[in-house]
Image (cartoon, helix red, strand yellow):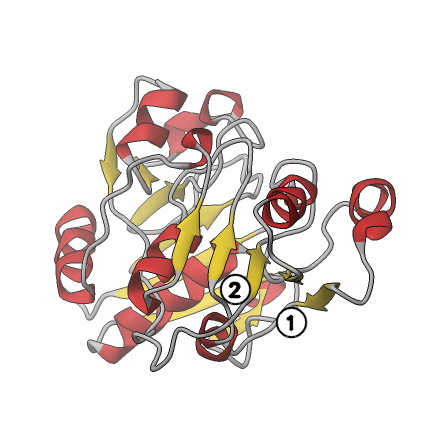
Amino acid sequence: MSKPFIKILSGWSNPGGSTTAFINLCNMFNDNGIDCVFYGPHAWHMDKCRGLPLDQAGANPDDNVIFHFINVGNKYPVRKMVYSCHETDLRPVKDIVPLAIYNFIHYVSNFQKDWHDVDKPSVVIPNVLSDLKKKLYKDSSVAGVIGSIDSHKRPHLSIKRALEDGFKEVHLYGAVTEVDYFKNEVQPLLNDKVVWKEYTEDKQAMYDSLHSVYHSSKRETFNYIKAECEQTGTSYLGLDENDPNATYMDKKEILELWKEALEI
């Protein structure tokens, strides 16, 4: 068998949980001698891993291709086709046509697999976590709200919860992915004490600056934020509906699960 090659093709490569997941996955493969390239339509991912534009992906017989948030339509002339699902109602697996072209579906948690409930071979492999460390101090009086700014993540609820709990300063971190929601629900809450920090790539510094993180999304498939709070020793204040009880694993365990699933 020739040397395995993995391609990740996503319809979204701007800041977001799925993009972070694929950057980390791509780097993990390459760090362990498995060639991998992450192709996406936006340029944000390209300096963070082996990243290229989506239109340069091509297809070769030895490729193992992981697809995400993209309409394929036809079987590719490749070794394996996998659909990697990072959403629930935003992109139900049952609506992917034709589903039969994929060898299997990849889910990031058992909760997500159960939610989609489709009759298709699948694997559950958690996301690769970023390399974060316990913070050296915990004397911050600032609450954080982290994640994409849209009506699904509901950061306006997190801001209000933090203020109701007595925090005098709240920092909002995230890119706007729903402009009208931002204008109507979030922008009116911003002032000298509730500050939008936009998106930051320095996660360690972000968590180091926060006492607690509030999270109020309608639903989560993996919950990076909870995992990163555990990694850094930051107080996590989420709601029941944003905890899928996902399993967190180290890179070695995740690598072995992917190798088994792809038969490489």
Mark 1–mark 2 distance (CA, rounded to whole Å): 9 Å
Q: Closer to us: mark 1 or mark 2?
A: 1
Residue 264 in sight: no
| Closer-to-camera residue (96/222) | 222
Which residue is under mark 1? 43
Give x and y (percent) for residue 205. 49, 79
Please provide percent x and percent y for residue 11: 59, 51
Tally the marks.
Answer: 2
Label 2: how many Cα within 10 Å (few below 14, some 14–19, many 20+): many
Rendering coords of residue 31 (x, y %):
25, 79
Q: Quadrant of residue 100?
A: top left
Q: Residues within 10 Å of mark 1 (few under 14, many from 20)?
A: some
On screen, residue 183 above or below 196:
above
Query: Which residue is pictured at 87% across the width and 47% down the height?
Result: 183
- The one nearer the camera, 24 or 41, is 24
Check the picture and name the quadrant holding the C terminus: bottom left
Numbered disc 2: secondary structure:
strand
Question: In the image, what residue occupies the spot 81% across and 57% down?
Answer: 190
Q: Is residue 136 left or right of residue 162?
A: left
Secondary structure of the residue carrying numbered label 1: loop
Front residue of this view, candidates 165 and 93: 165
132 with respect to 206 (left or right): left
Q: Is residue 188 above or below residue 250?
A: above
Residue at image mark 2: 39
The N terminus lies in quadrant: bottom left
Q: Quadrant of residue 35?
A: bottom left
Q: Is residue 40 toward the left or the right of residue 31 in the image?
A: right
Residue 201 in view here: yes
Q: Is residue 48 above or below residue 261?
A: below
Label 1 amino acid?
Ala
